[in-house]
Image (cartoon, rainbow, N blue to C red):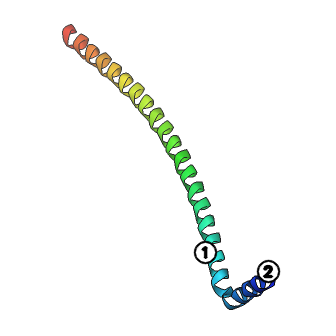
């Protein structure tokens, strides 16, 4: 009985080896592409974090610049008022 089963398996392997190899190759490609997808998703998360950090830095610098510009405008307006009041 066991030898009959082994003979049947040998026949199937010889007869359908192309299909078995194709399925094995497709599984290998599927696993490879899944791993690549995971790597790309990790890279995307890293880039998004970096972008968020850059955005926060930009907003902070923009706020400081706006505050400084506002102070300079107020100083300029005071100087203009002083000049007008002297006349």
Residue that carries the numbered disc 1 in the rendered image: 26
**Which image quadrant is residue 87 in?**
top left
Q: Is residue 47 left or right of residue 68?
A: right
Residue 86, relative to residue 27: is it above or below? above
Q: Residue at x 61, y 59 (%)?
A: 35
Cα distance, mark 1 to mark 2? 31 Å
Q: Residue at x 28, y 15 (%)?
A: 79
Mark 1 or 2: in front is 2
Task: Decide: few, some or many residues near mark 1? Use Cα within 10 Å; few <14, some 14-19, many ≥20.
Answer: few
Q: Is residue 56 left or right of residue 85?
A: right
Q: What is the x, y in percent for residue 12?
A: 69, 87
Q: Quick one: label 1 or label 2, which is nearer the N terminus?
A: 2
Q: Residue at x 81, y 84 (%)?
A: 3
Q: Nearer the viewer, residue 35 or 2?
A: 2
In the picture, which quadrant includes the N terminus?
bottom right
Task: Decide: few, some or many residues near mark 2? Use Cα within 10 Å; few <14, some 14-19, many ≥20.
Answer: few
In this view, the residue farthest toward the right is: 3
Badge 1 element: helix
Badge 2 element: helix
Which numbered marker is on residue 2?
2
Q: What is the x, y in percent for residue 73?
A: 30, 22
Q: What is the x, y in percent for residue 29?
A: 62, 71
**Which image quadrant is residue 27 in?**
bottom right
């Amino acid at each position: 009985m066991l030898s009959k089963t082994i003979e049947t398996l040998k026949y199937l392997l010889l007869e359908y080896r192309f299909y078995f190899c194709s399925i094995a190759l497709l599984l290998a490609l599927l696993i490879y592409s899944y791993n690549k997808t995971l790597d790309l998703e990790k890279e995307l998360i890293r880039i998004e974090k970096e972008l968020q950090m850059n955005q926060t830095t930009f907003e902070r610098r923009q706020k400081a610049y706006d505050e400084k510009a506002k102070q300079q405008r107020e100083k300029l307006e005071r100087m203009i008022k002083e000049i007008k009041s002297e006349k």
